[in-house]
Image (spheres, grey):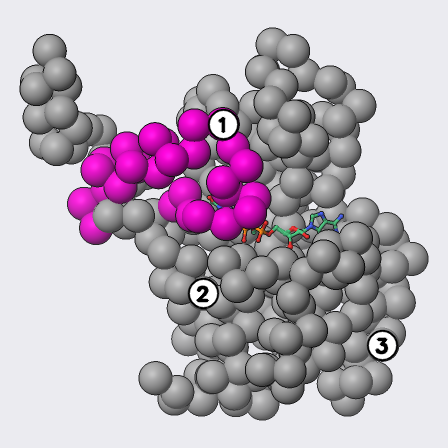
Amino acid sequence: MANDLLKGKVGIITGALDENSIAWKTALKAHEQGARFVLTNAPLAMRMGAIKELAEQTNSIVIPADATSLEDIEKLYTEAKEHLGGNFDFILHSIGMSTNIRKGKSYGDLNHEWALKSYDVSGLSFHKMMQVAEKMDVMNEWGSILALSYIAAQRVFPFYTDMAEAKALLENIARGYGYRFGKLKKVRVNTISQSPTRTTAGSGIDGFNEFFDIADLMSPLGNASAEACAEYIVMMFSDYTRMVTMQNLFHDGGYSFTGVSEELMEMVRKSG
Ligand SMILES: NC(=O)c1ccc[n+]([C@@H]2O[C@H](COP(=O)([O-])OP(=O)(O)OC[C@H]3O[C@@H](n4cnc5c(N)ncnc54)[C@H](O)[C@@H]3O)[C@@H](O)[C@H]2O)c1
């Protein structure tokens, strides 16, 4: 359904690794709604990824950048500005990585060097992207900056280990920079807290399949898909959400405010 919600808007979309990625679906939806953008991902991911295919489909280009490197971000913005012909209306941070999770480390056995890397890649990189955007003055007034989070920032999910702290950091950066960018340029900054989603990052988590099903049973609307998340992101980039800032927005089918569902109780009753 194309109704030009993002007509005339330009921006940056990080994190499209493959067709399951939330960023990949977002690129397709944003293109459908009239946006022009540059795609970016870590140079390593690009060597394995199919991102060029997405660029062709969405009439965009790909500029590699490691989101933890200030130099890479500067180069990304410089080249993107040149390609898009001006400043940006939106930036999507859709980046997450934990070596501790990938290597199956439990919360009581974290490798702290890797934990610092998780915080840098998954949390601090959001600050870096905004700090460079501020210094280079690349955001248009009333622009929108978003990152993707998970409810483990507020509640304990044992298998999410160091990513829980990374998401807490990410959400706090959205508040801190949301205040600053609001004052500076009327730019809004938010995080979307998404349901468990079958992507490379999601499926790498221990017990993901069981947890996906439990969350689905808990949520009155069921788990939110990556595609539905992409639609929400498009709305957050559109002019219809100009006064929403410094928020963590749950996009989870009602999971976050459900104590227990009848379906889960029924499962326990049957198993007992
Ligand atoms: N999948 C889920 O269950 C779920 C739920 C809530 C939130 N999220 C969040 O959504 C976001 C997108 O993840 P996804 O589920 O689409 O998975 P994904 O694996 O498709 O995307 C993660 C992306 O991060 C990129 N990345 C990693 N290190 C990077 C770096 N140094 N510089 C630049 N990019 C880097 C990867 O290349 C990849 O494209 C992440 O922040 C993730 O934590 C995912």
Assess whether residue 210 is covered by the magenta stretch.
yes
Look at the numbered discs 2 and 3 and tell me whether their residues touch, using CB distance below 8 Å: no
Residue 103 percent coordinates (x, y): 65, 26
Q: What residue appears at the point 44 percent right and 89 percent down from the top-left corner?
A: 4
Q: Disc 1 designates what residue?
A: 206
Looking at the picture, tell me which residue is in the foreground, 266 or 86.
266
Q: In the image, residue 1 lies at what x, y percent? A: 34, 84
Q: Please indicate whether residue 254 sits to the left or right of residue 163 in the image.
A: left
Query: Residue 230, labelled with which disc?
Result: 2
Residue annotated with mark 3? 79
Q: Tell me the crowding category of disc 1: few under 14, some 14 to 19, or many 20 or more residues within 10 angstroms, Cα based.
A: some
Question: What separation in Å lies between label 2 and label 1 (alpha carbons)?
Answer: 25 Å
**Crowdedness near tag 2: few (<14), some (14–19) or many (≥20) residues, C-alpha within 10 Å:** many
C-alpha distance separating marks 3 and 1 = 38 Å
Label 3: which secondary element = helix
Indicate whether residue 251 is drawn in magenta: no
Q: Which residues are magenta?
A: 195-221
Q: Do the residues under discs 2 and 1 have CB atoms within 8 angstroms?
A: no
Helix, strand or loop at mark 1: loop
Whether residue 220 sits left or right of residue 164 in the image: it is left
Dividing the picture into quadrants, the one containing residue 36 is bottom right
Image side of residue 80 versus residue 198, left or right:
right
| Amino acid residing under circle 1 | Asp
The residues bearing labels 2 and 3 have C-alpha atoms spaced at a distance of 25 Å
Residue 60 image-quadrant placement:
bottom right
Q: Amino acid at mark 3?
A: Glu
